[in-house]
Image: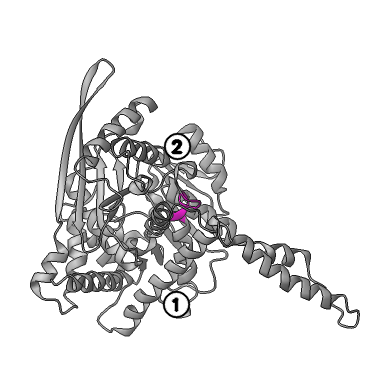
């Protein structure tokens, strides 16, 4: 239970915004223009299911149109409300600005528990919701482009895209009305894993800077670091999987809605994930120490804590007991403004959500561009790239035939070098470059300004500055 003085999620976003703009020299009118949400639409619609009409409430909030289209996910949750959607839309504005995705910020939500409905029922609900949004231009390739969020995925995005196409039969760019679609329905390779992959790239970039590692009281590389993950959904699962399999991290605890697992020797992420898919939770998993109050493991000793589920899980009720020296916010708003202050005073470094989980919107941008260009990335250049590489390999093999030189090409080098970049490789390359560049812009502000003590404030300063520049260019 959080304390009464705990700020709401929306209040947290406003407080963090205020902390940043206090360090900027913005005209009051421009500051207010960036702060406020431009519009929020509430739609209520009925769908006949199980012999009666059920009424559903959905939201689509547009925070900023300094760039269009606006971009943001649609979540399905009984906790969805106007304040939450507006706060998430604001975060999307700042997130897109930080990673230089040319979108304004938006967000949507439907008050529904997807588990309460069969697939065919959920499809009817989703299509009707999409219809209500699309007829108001709240789904449109050039105005408002949704994406998956909590409770939604490829399946729902495919339904939405098809519903929009049915309503706009002559729109050649109809597939670009939404991102996060299945690959065979206009999606892009690497999108499903994108947010988790972005978390991995963010940590890799952080650990390239000795000064930053030292700020968290850590040393060395990611190899061997003890990691606790809260939420093994799409984002948490992929982040944990990549960090353990590719960077040598040990996932010592996994926290789910029904409890938590702890194993100091490291949990098998893939095996735990398969168990959750089959059994709906971690209870009964044959390895590790299970406790019903899984949130207690947020306070367990580790090197890196990854909250990857709901907002506000680290708050004034538990912030003092958090032991992790480094927190990376894979979820939106998992640390409240009150807890953020407590953690900063303890010297804990937080890699903020607007940067850490920006992998999703980054690869969504790539998918949107792919849909508008009507061609798969790599299709034009991959074989030409392989042919150029083959010329070099041929020359090197000719040289290696000279016995006096005494060297040969290793088979693994030849295979890897000759492989041209396809869509997945290009997506990962673009995401890695984006995460590195965005971290560099935050880091520069963090270390160059004496009045900026943390990465979150630095991220807000960079993002708000870019939004302000865009508005000024529009004559505001």
Q: Please report the residue visible at 45 percent of the width from the left and 37 percent of the height from the top.
A: 281
Residue 433 visible? The answer is yes
Q: Of 354 and 335, which appears nearest the observer?
A: 354
The quarter of the rendered structure image containing the C terminus is bottom left
Q: Please report the residue visible at 47 percent of the width from the left and 42 percent of the height from the top.
A: 290
Q: Position of residue 258 (x, y in %)?
A: 40, 38
Q: Secondary structure at mark 1?
A: helix
Note whether 185 is above or below 433 in the view shown.
Answer: above
- Residue tagged 1: 214
- Determine which quarter of the picture holds residue 36: bottom left
Q: CA distance from mark 2 to mark 1?
A: 36 Å
Q: Secondary structure at mark 2?
A: loop
Residue 247 belongs to magenta span? no
Dots 2, 1 in contact, CB < 8 A = no
- Residue tagged 2: 281
**Residue at the far right in the pictured view:** 403
**Residue at the far top in the pictured view:** 51
Main SS category, magenta section:
loop
Q: Position of residue 129 (x, y in %)?
A: 25, 35
Q: Please report the residue visible at 55 percent of the width from the left and 49 percent of the height from the top.
A: 267
């Amino acid at each position: 239970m959080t304390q009464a003085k705990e700020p709401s999620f929306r209040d947290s976003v406003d407080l963090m915004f205020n902390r940043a703009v206090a360090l900027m020299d913005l005209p009051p009118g421009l500051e207010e223009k960036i702060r406020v949400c431009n519009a929020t639409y509430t739609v209520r619609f009925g769908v006949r299911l199980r012999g009666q009409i059920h009424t559903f409430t959905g939201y689509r909030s547009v925070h900023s149109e300094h760039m269009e289209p606006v971009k943001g996910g649609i979540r399905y949750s009984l906790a969805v409300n106007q304040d939450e959607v507006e706060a998430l839309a604001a975060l999307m504005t700042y997130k897109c600005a930080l990673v230089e995705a040319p979108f304004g910020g938006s967000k949507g939500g439907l008050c529904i528990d997807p588990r309460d409905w069969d697939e065919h029922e959920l499809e009817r609900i989703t299509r009707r919701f999409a219809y209500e949004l699309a007829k108001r231009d709240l789904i449109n390739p050039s105005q408002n482009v949704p994406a998956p969020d909590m409770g939604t995925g490829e399946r729902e995005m495919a339904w939405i895209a098809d519903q929009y196409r049915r309503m706009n039969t002559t729109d050649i760019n109809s597939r670009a009305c939404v991102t996060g679609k299945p690959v065979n329905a206009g999606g892009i390779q690497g999108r499903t894993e994108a947010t988790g992959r972005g978390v991995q790239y963010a940590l890799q970039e952080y650990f390239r800077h000795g000064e930053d590692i030292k700020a968290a009281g850590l040393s060395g590389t990611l190899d061997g670091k003890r990691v606790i993950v809260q939420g093994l959904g799409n984002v948490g699962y992929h982040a944990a999987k990549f960090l353990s399999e590719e960077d040598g991290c040990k996932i010592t605890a996994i926290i789910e809605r029904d409890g938590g697992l702890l194993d100091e020797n490291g949990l098998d992420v893939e095996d735990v994930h398969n168990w959750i898919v089959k059994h709906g939770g971690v209870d009964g998993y044959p390895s590790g120490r299970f406790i019903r109050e899984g949130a207690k493991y947020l306070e367990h000793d580790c090197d890196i804590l990854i909250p990857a589920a709901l907002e506000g899980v680290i708050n004034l009720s538990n912030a003092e007991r958090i032991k992790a020296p480094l927190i990376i916010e894979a979820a939106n708003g998992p640390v409240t403004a009150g807890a953020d202050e407590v953690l900063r005073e303890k010297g804990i470094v937080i890699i903020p959500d607007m940067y850490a989980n920006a992998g999703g919107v980054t690869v969504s941008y790539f998918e949107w561009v792919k849909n508008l260009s009507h061609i798969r990335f790599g299709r034009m250049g991959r074989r030409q790239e392989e042919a150029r590489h083959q010329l070099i390999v041929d020359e090197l093999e000719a040289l290696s035939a000279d016995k006096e030189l005494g060297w040969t090409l290793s088979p693994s080098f030849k295979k890897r070098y000759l492989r041209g970049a396809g869509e997945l490789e290009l997506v990962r390359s673009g995401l890695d470059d984006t995460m590195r560049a965005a971290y560099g812009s935050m880091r520069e502000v963090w270390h160059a300004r004496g009045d900026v003590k943390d990465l979150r404030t630095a991220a807000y300063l960079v993002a708000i500055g870019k939004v302000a520049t865009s508005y000024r260019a529009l004559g505001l």
